[in-house]
Image (spheres, helix red, strand yellow):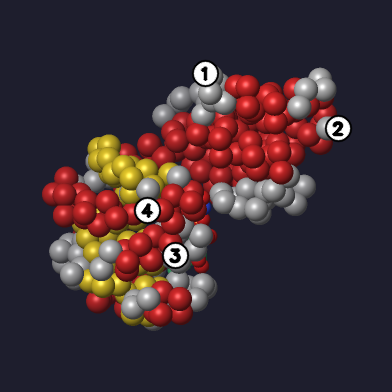
């Protein structure tokens, strides 16, 4: 079995490396990023998304957002140009659920089955192969690709039909963004009140307020080290997809709209390429910490 991997960025590259290490035969492609390190590990370099799809039984995509996946799958030189009937396409990007459904319908016309399988856990878990993978789509296709996803994931859960993976990911991103804002707001207050933020962290991380987000992001905030990780610009993309989905379904999401505004303000201030833990900078600037 040959596996295609399209999108070799912060996340895709280590995920592809783990598949190679597990013994899968890979053909890889990225429109802008190099693939030499993967070729050195035994991957074949594809020349386009269509080329990758023509050589693979299962094609994985790990791209920034809906327009990139549309282009790589449905565009000129895209997956659907090269894929055979029976190919399984697993889009692991975080995109709008409605876009997953639209691309899946186009794939179906070519006999290609598509799953949406976005991930959570960031670069460290992509490297460790312990991502949380949330999958939407056809159950038989899910059963076929599950061993492959298990190489990249610590948990792989089918949550429903196509689009359900990305609905789950939107929920994840709303919770993470609001958790970072809560931590930033609280730690800025403690600092301004003259209490050491390190001491606050040590005192509360084992209590009810403690969280995976607190453990991962507070050390970055305390060090002033906002190297991504997960960029603010990408988180704005996820929150916009959440707001659009909520708007279409008439669901009020006032807190998510608020954190989106904070992230937009940071982007306008030139901080969009920083890790999303830089939300703390918004509070620190306003409070003059
Ligand atoms: P990235 O920007 O580092 O990588 C995306 C790659 O896609 C780039 O190398 C780019 O050159 C390539 N690309 C763009 N358009 C293409 C096209 N048409 N054809 C082929 N290649 C193309 O992004 P990332 O951080 O790896 O994130 C990828 C996805 O995973 C995003 O949807 C993101 O929201 C999600 N995600 C990221 C993280 C994280 O911590 N970085 C965590 C969980 C989920």
Residue in the image at 47% along x and 73% along y: 31
The quarter of the displayed image where residue 177 is located: top right
- Per the model, the C-alpha gap separating discs 1 and 2 is 29 Å
Q: Which residue is mark 3?
A: 13
Q: Earlier in the sequence, mark 1 or mark 2?
A: 1
Crowd band around label 3 with a 10 angstrom C-alpha radius: few (<14), some (14–19), many (20+):
many
Between the C-alphas of marks 3 and 1, the distance is 36 Å
Q: In this figure, which residue is indicated by the disc labeled 1? A: 208
Mark 1 neighbour class, 10 Å CA radius: few under 14, some 14 to 19, many 20 or more: few
Direction from residue 50 to residue 56 in the image, left or right: left
Q: Secondary structure at mark 3?
A: helix
Asked if the residue at tag 1 contacts the one at tag 4, i.e. Cβ–Cβ closer than 8 Å, the answer is no
| Badge number at residue 129 | 4
Q: Secondary structure at mark 2?
A: loop
Reading the chain from its start, which is encountered first: label 3 or label 1? 3
Name which residue lies at 39% across and 79% down. Answer: 39
Q: Earlier in the sequence, mark 3 or mark 2?
A: 3
Quadrant assignment, res 170:
top left
Q: Which residue is mark 2?
A: 288
Q: Quadrant of residue 201?
A: top right
């Amino acid at each position: 079995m040959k596996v295609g991997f399209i999108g070799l960025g912060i996340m895709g590259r280590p995920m592809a490396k783990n598949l190679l290490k597990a013994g899968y035969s890979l053909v890889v492609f990225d429109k802008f990023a190099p693939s030499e390190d993967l070729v050195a590990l035994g991957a074949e370099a594809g020349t386009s998304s269509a080329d990758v799809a023509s050589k693979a039984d299962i094609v994985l995509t790990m791209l920034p957002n809906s327009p990139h996946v549309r282009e790589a799958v449905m565009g000129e030189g895209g997956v659907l140009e090269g894929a055979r009937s029976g190919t399984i396409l697993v889009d692991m990007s975080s995109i709008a659920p409605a876009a997953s459904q639209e691309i899946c319908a186009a794939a179906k016309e070519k006999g290609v089955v598509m799953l949406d399988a976005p991930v959570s856990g960031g670069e460290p878990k992509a490297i460790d192969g312990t991502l949380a993978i949330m999958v939407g789509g056809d159950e038989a296709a899910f059963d076929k690709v599950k061993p492959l996803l298990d190489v990249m994931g610590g948990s792989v859960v089918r949550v429903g039909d196509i689009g359900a993976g990305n609905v789950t990911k939107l929920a994840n991103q709303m919770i993470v963004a609001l958790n970072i804002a809560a931590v930033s707001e609280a730690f800025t207050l403690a600092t301004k009140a003259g209490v050491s933020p390190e001491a606050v962290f040590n005192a509360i991380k084992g209590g009810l307020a403690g969280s995976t987000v607190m453990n991962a992001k507070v050390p970055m905030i305390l060090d002033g080290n906002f190297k991504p990780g997960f960029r603010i610009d990408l988180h704005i993309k996820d929150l916009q997809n959440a707001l659009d989905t909520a708007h279409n379904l008439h669901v009020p999401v006032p807190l998510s709209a608020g954190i989106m505004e904070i992230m937009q303000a940071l982007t306008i201030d030139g901080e969009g390429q920083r890790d999303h833990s830089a939300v703390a900078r918004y509070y620190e600037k306003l409070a003059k910490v």
